[in-house]
Image (cartoon, helix red, strand yellow):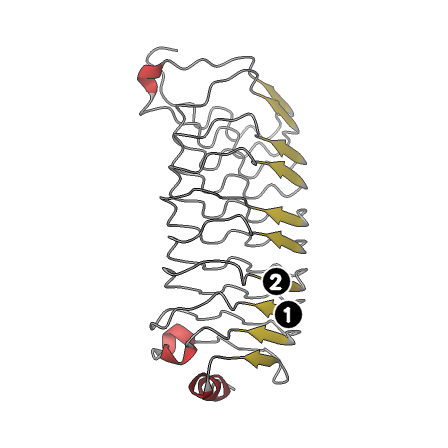
Amino acid sequence: MQGTFRFSMMFSGRKYLREASVKELIFNSSLTQYLNLSSMFSGCTSLETFDLGNSDTSYNISLNSMFRNCQSIETIDLSWMSTNSVTDMQYLFSGCSSLTSYDISTFDWSNVTNITHILSNCTSLTKATLAIQNAPKLTTANDLFHGCTNLTEVDLTKADFSLITGMSHWFYKCTSLEEINLSYLNLPNVTTYYGLLRECTSLKKADLSCLVSSANINAANMFENCKNLQELDIRNWQINKITTAANYASIFTNVPYTCKIIVKDEACRTWVKARN
């Protein structure tokens, strides 16, 4: 393919498309800086299967919204795909409401900077795994599982989030999630936890002992409407350093007064009690 750089939106919006088959795409090395597969199938609400044959994707720089709102796809296997040049994976599977399984286990994350909304609103997904290893440029990862209403299990044990700056709405409206343990994560650069577990109405136990930030970070709405929460572990978080009212607004709104909250010290205990 000479002189054709963008394949983004190639099938985008074809809502009656059921099957897509591209036998082979061969990209000349001169396209290295320009190849873009973003939104390729975005909005194909009837698409059930796809076949990209022997396509060479090693020069592709973006997977942004590639399968966004493909509401009929139940399983996606991208283990064949080369992602060594990809920088953007925002909204990759967002809105795939029938998706129950996916395989991205062979992805190369070395140049990826943004995975915001990568699995948001996948309402049929019950288990999610993100093995994001060797990600030295990944800084943006908000809304990862936003709206995954049937999600019950999350595995991030092999995920490198050491450079991300925000965790906003990671589990917002994950209404089937009953327990979450993120104690193993390394998150030294996070400055916002806005709405992290907001509307997790079935959540009973949360281990967030990974949180260590002592700055005046944004934690507004963080546990709002976790109305069945029984135990919360924030033992390493100097939460009392949040002094700006807007940064802690509604942080514990509708969390049961009987919830056991494990905190760092007496100063943190006093701060939490002051939030009622």
Q: Which mark is residue 94?
A: none
Sequence-wise, the earlier of marks 1 and 2 is 2
| Residue 73 visible, this angle | no
**In this image, 71 relative to 87: left or right?**
right
Relative to 25, does residue 158 appear above or below in the rendering?
below
Q: Identify the amino acid type marked 2.
A: Ile
**In this image, 92 relative to 19: left or right?**
left
| Residue 84 visible, this angle | yes
**In this image, 236 relative to 232: left or right?**
left
The residue sitting at 56% across, 25% down in the picture is 80
The one nearer the camera, 251 or 262, is: 262
Element type at marker 1? strand
Task: Find residue 123 and report its horizontal and vertical position in percent.
Answer: 64, 49
The one nearer the camera, 43 or 5, is: 5
Task: Find residue 16 and report its horizontal and vertical position in percent.
Answer: 62, 28
The residue sitting at 50% across, 39% down in the picture is 92
Category of crowding for the residue at label 2, using alpha-carbon neighbours closer than 10 angstroms: few (below 14), some (14–19), many (at least 20): some
Q: On the image, numbered disc 1 is attached to which residue?
A: 205
Q: On the image, numbered disc 2 is attached to which residue?
A: 180
